Image (cartoon, rainbow, N blue to C red):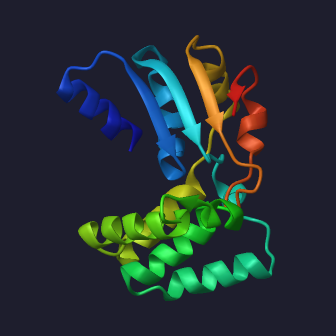
């Protein structure tokens, strides 16, 4: 997928770009940065892991509940509820924004977004799991990013349920947010 991103940059005539990726997109962004560091102005990674076992969250009652509800979600509304609980803390969601809670605002946006694109197919889900499981960053690739000379920012919450920041500790001299 990183080669696809490079091909898109070529198609658009972009010599360099500021690259941002979230979750699996951050894995792709890391590969892109390692493959073509001269094409990046900066790299920003949100909730990234190094793939494989790093993708596994801690297993507890909350995570098992989320996994069960995620796999059973058949409507955009059900999926939005699980996504909100996965990506945000309860306190953040309960904050008031205008006349309603942030949960309600985000819920409506998530349902709208999921409804406009449709639910992910089983085949798509299996492909995503496989891509994340088989993603690896070698020491050489990490060194390429480390010494490329562009700013690398890693944005990662303290209470993130689905990511482990092992990869972050392997890229020294980065901005950790």
- Work out whether residue 77 or residue 151 is closer to the camera in this orientation and state it: 77
Query: Would you identify the image quadrant in which residue 117 lies?
Result: bottom left
Image height of 157 relative to 152, above or below? below
Q: Residue at x 38, y 45 (%)?
A: 1
- Work out whether residue 96 or residue 17 is closer to the camera in this orientation and state it: 96
Residue 37 image point, x, y percent = 48, 19
Q: Residue at x 79, y 67 (%)?
A: 58
Query: Would you identify the image quadrant in which residue 149 lies?
Result: top right
**Viewport quadrant of the C terminus:** top right
Q: Is residue 160 left or right of residue 70?
A: right
Q: Residue at x 38, y 85 (%)?
A: 75
Q: Residue at x 44, y 71 (%)?
A: 125
Q: Is residue 106 left or right of residue 167?
A: left
Image height of 26 relative to 126, above or below? above
Tell me how many marks there are.
0
Image height of 145 relative to 29, above or below? above
Can residue 141 be seen in the rendering of this structure?
Answer: no
């Amino acid at each position: 997928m990183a080669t696809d991103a490079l091909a898109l940059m070529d198609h658009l005539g972009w010599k360099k770009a500021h690259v941002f990726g979230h979750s699996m997109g951050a894995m792709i962004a890391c590969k892109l940065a390692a493959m073509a560091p001269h094409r990046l102005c900066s790299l920003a990674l949100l909730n990234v892991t190094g793939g494989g076992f790093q993708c596994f969250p801690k297993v507890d009652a909350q995570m098992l509940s989320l996994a069960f509800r995620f796999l059973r979600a058949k409507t955009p509304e059900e999926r939005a509820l699980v996504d909100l609980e996965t990506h945000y803390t309860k306190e953040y969601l309960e904050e008031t924004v205008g006349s309603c809670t942030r949960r309600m605002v985000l819920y409506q946006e998530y349902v709208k977004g999921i409804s406009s694109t449709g639910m992910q197919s089983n085949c798509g889900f299996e492909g995503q799991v496989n891509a994340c499981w088989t993603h690896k960053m070698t020491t050489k690739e990490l060194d390429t990013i480390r010494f490329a000379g562009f700013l690398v920012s890693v944005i990662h919450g303290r209470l993130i349920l689905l990511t482990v920041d092992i990869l972050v500790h392997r890229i020294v001299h980065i901005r950790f947010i």
